[in-house]
Image (spheres, helix red, strand yellow):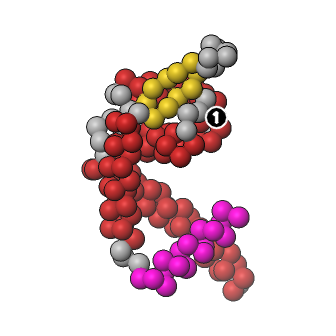
Amino acid sequence: MSEQWKINNREEQIIEITEMFRLFSKKWMAEWNKRKPEGISPTHAAILTLLESKGPQKPSSLAAELHITTGGVTGLTDKLVDAGYASRTRDDADRRLVYLEITEAGRELLKDITRVKRERETSIFSALNDEELNSYLQLLQKLCD
């Protein structure tokens, strides 16, 4: 009987953890939406971050890095290009190849996004003391492994 209670309790705990993770993700996005630049999603920010750190990239490289389709990257980068945050250039040797590159306006936007992101992270995780934060990190690393 005790073993059955443990199984049910474990199952209930997993259900509760899953629900809490969903709620945490929802809170995370709500915080993003409160402070985000107009029309910029976390995936837009991820694209700008990759372009800043890795230089000009082919859409297929961005898609692989972000685990989305090349078509998805095209839609996302269309918005960044239209807003002046990124630009497209063709390869001189092979005109079929298109590279995306961050612009100076994109770099400025990324600085602002990074600042706001750090403020949000600091605010959300201020509920945890150093020991809890370390434990949370270790647990997430274990789950990701």
* Residue 12 in sight: no
Does 3 sit left or right of 72 as displayed?
right
Tell which of 3 and 86 is nearer to you.
86
Q: Residue at x 48, y 77 (%)?
A: 133
Residue 106 counted in the magenta span: no
Residue 134 counted in the magenta span: yes
Q: Residue at x 32, y 55 (%)?
A: 116
Q: Where's the N terminus, which quadrant? A: bottom right
Q: Residue at x 57, y 43 (%)?
A: 54
Residue range (magenta): 129-145
In the rendering, at what x and y percent does residue 13 appear? 57, 72
User: Relative to 38, does residue 130 appear above or below in the rendering?
Assistant: below
Number of marks in the rendered image: 1
Tell which of 28 and 53 is nearer to you.
53
Q: Amino acid at mark 1?
A: Ser
Say which element carries label 1.
Answer: helix
In the rendering, at what x and y percent does residue 99 appear? 57, 26
Location of residue 126 (image quadrant) = bottom left
Tell which of 46 and 145 is nearer to you.
46
Residue under label 1, please give it. 61
In the rendering, at what x and y percent does residue 73 appear? 54, 30
Q: Where's the C terminus, which quadrant? A: bottom right
In the rendering, at what x and y percent does residue 98 appear? 58, 21
Main secondary structure type of the part rendered in magenta: helix
